[in-house]
Image: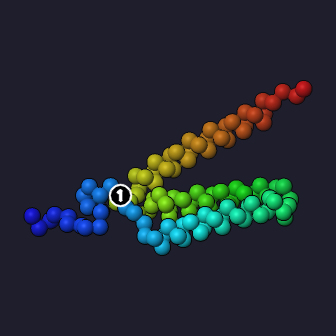
Amino acid sequence: MANHNNSHDGHGAHGGGHSGSMKSYVIGFLLSIVLTIIPLVAVMNDLFSKKVTTVLILIMAILQFAVQLLFFMHIRDEEKPRYNLMALIFGLVILITIVAGSIWIMTYNAVAV
């Protein structure tokens, strides 16, 4: 009987996952806003060349993805984060394979008119 989980914060045996603190959510929200505004300003004001702007947008998208995973989806707060991380990496490998394959096919199999 002494080993029962008497947690009153909603994280008991049937708690259904972790939740972040208000501070974590606010930091994640502010980072998301900043990571959205930076490429928006760069595009709207033509601050950089087309290639630099494209790279900036891609970098901001990757950082936005990381912020979403860490601050809102709590990828590092799980009891067994390794399984979630492995599933995420596998999904990313599949996604990259499909996107890269599609780009390769569209690039090298285009018919000149």
> Is 9 on the left-hand or right-hand side of 90?
left
Residue 6 in view (yes/no): yes
Answer with the quarter of the image where residue 8 lies.
bottom left
At x 78% / y 36%, what residue is drawn?
A: 107
Residue 42 pos. (x, y %):
79, 63
At x 54% / y 66%, what residue is drawn?
A: 28
Residue 104 pos. (x, y %):
73, 37
Residue 25 pos. (x, y %):
50, 67
The image's colour scheme reads rainbow
Answer with the quarter of the image where residue 76 lies.
bottom left
Residue 52 in view (yes/no): no
Q: Which residue is mark 1?
A: 17
Depth check: give the residue in front, 81 or 33: 33
Quadrant placement of the C terminus: top right
At label 1, the amino acid type is Gly
How many numbered circles are shown?
A: 1
